[in-house]
């Protein structure tokens, strides 16, 4: 079997790709596409307030805010979800009968995208590590999305990290809670680890540096290792040692596990509410 690299997949994409919304996430995706070999002349960006970085990409061939709508082979919708009721109808002129529409908006269902924009819809949920090419995205296709269109969506999403596919759109709410919102939980861990270090007597600057480096370094170790996270945890924990003493608190019946379950449940519930 021939394995196609994502660079080759991006180079093989045909037609015009219209990116609606070039904020942090949309901008990261565009940068990833171009770095992966997508011809800049295939990209059209609709962004009323382009950053200097996006303007610089326009100088390299990306078409920025064309005066007339072009029919897109692929439309990537990266506007803020709260802006979609106003922005969505303005995107319809870019959508032809066979246009692939890839949405990375939280809370906007496939049915709503089909109704407002038309086209063949893939709904995706990335996360903010996409900004450094280390994101993870979960995507779900509408029933009328072809295998070729799914491959195109996969290549575009994979330019900023790994991609997983599901068939049940209802799972996206839990995905949003775990990976979409997940970076905030990790950043909070770094905050609270530093704060606890200060409480233990460390200078604030040192506690902050220790917490940041520990969280980021542990994340990189987890990324590079094939071992389960539980095994990595056990490898750090000596019986009767300092780590074991701390984990006894964190793994108690009222510790981290029930707290995280409640947090994910709350985020999932809110995602469901926003989709209504």
Image (tube, rainbow, N blue to C red):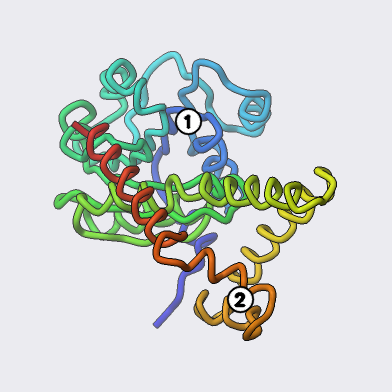
**Label annotation for residue 244:** 2
Residue 91, given in percent of the width and then of the height, sits at 31, 23
Above or below: residue 57 compared with residue 211: above
Among the two numbered marks 1 and 2 on one chain, the one whose residue lies closer to the N terminus:
1
Q: For this view, does 63 lie left or right of residue 153?
A: right
Above or below — where is 119 with respect to 150? Answer: above
Q: Which marked residue is nearer to the observer: mark 1 or mark 2? A: 2
Tag 1's secondary structure?
A: strand
Counting the numbered discs, the total is: 2
Residue that label 1 marks: 44
| Residue 258 or residue 149, whichever sits in front | 258
Quadrant of the drawing holding the N terminus: bottom left
Residue at image point 50% right, 16% down: 48
Q: Position of residue 251 (x, y in %)?
A: 48, 68
In this rendering, would 214 be left or right of 9?
right
Residue toward you, 270 or 145: 270
Can see residue 23?
yes
Residue 254 vs 102, above or below: the answer is: below
Q: Residue at x 51, y 38 (%)?
A: 25
Q: Is residue 22 left or right of residue 58?
A: left
- Say which of 227 and 97 sits in front: 227
- The residue sitting at 33% across, 19% down in the picture is 87
């Amino acid at each position: 079997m021939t394995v196609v690299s994502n660079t080759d997949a991006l180079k093989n994409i045909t037609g015009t790709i219209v990116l609606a919304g070039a904020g942090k996430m949309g901008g990261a995706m565009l940068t990833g596409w171009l770095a992966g070999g997508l011809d800049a002349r295939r990209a059209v960006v609709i962004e009323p307030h382009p950053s200097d970085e996006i303007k610089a990409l326009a100088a390299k061939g990306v078409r920025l805010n064309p005066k007339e709508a072009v029919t897109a082979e692929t439309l990537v919708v990266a506007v803020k979800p709260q802006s979609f009721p106003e922005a969505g109808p303005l995107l319809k002129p870019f959508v032809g009968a066979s246009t692939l529409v890839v949405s990375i908006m939280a809370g906007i269902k496939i049915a709503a995208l089909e109704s407002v924009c038309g086209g063949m819809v893939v709904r995706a949920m990335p996360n903010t590590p996409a900004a450094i090419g280390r994101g993870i995205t979960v995507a779900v296709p509408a029933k009328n999305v072809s295998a070729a269109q799914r491959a195109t969506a996969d290549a575009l999403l994979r330019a900023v990290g790994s991609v997983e596919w599901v068939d049940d759109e209802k799972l996206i709410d839990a995905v949003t809670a775990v990976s979409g919102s997940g970076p905030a939980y990790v950043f909070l861990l770094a905050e609270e680890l530093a704060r606890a270090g200060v409480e233990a007597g460390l200078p604030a600057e040192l506690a902050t540096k220790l917490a940041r480096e520990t969280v980021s370094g542990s994340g990189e170790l987890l990324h590079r290792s094939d071992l389960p996270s539980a095994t990595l945890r056990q490898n750090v924990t000596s019986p009767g040692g300092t780590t074991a003493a701390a984990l006894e608190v964190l793994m108690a019946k009222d510790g981290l596990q029930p707290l995280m379950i409640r947090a994910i449940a709350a985020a999932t519930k809110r995602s469901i509410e926003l989709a209504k």
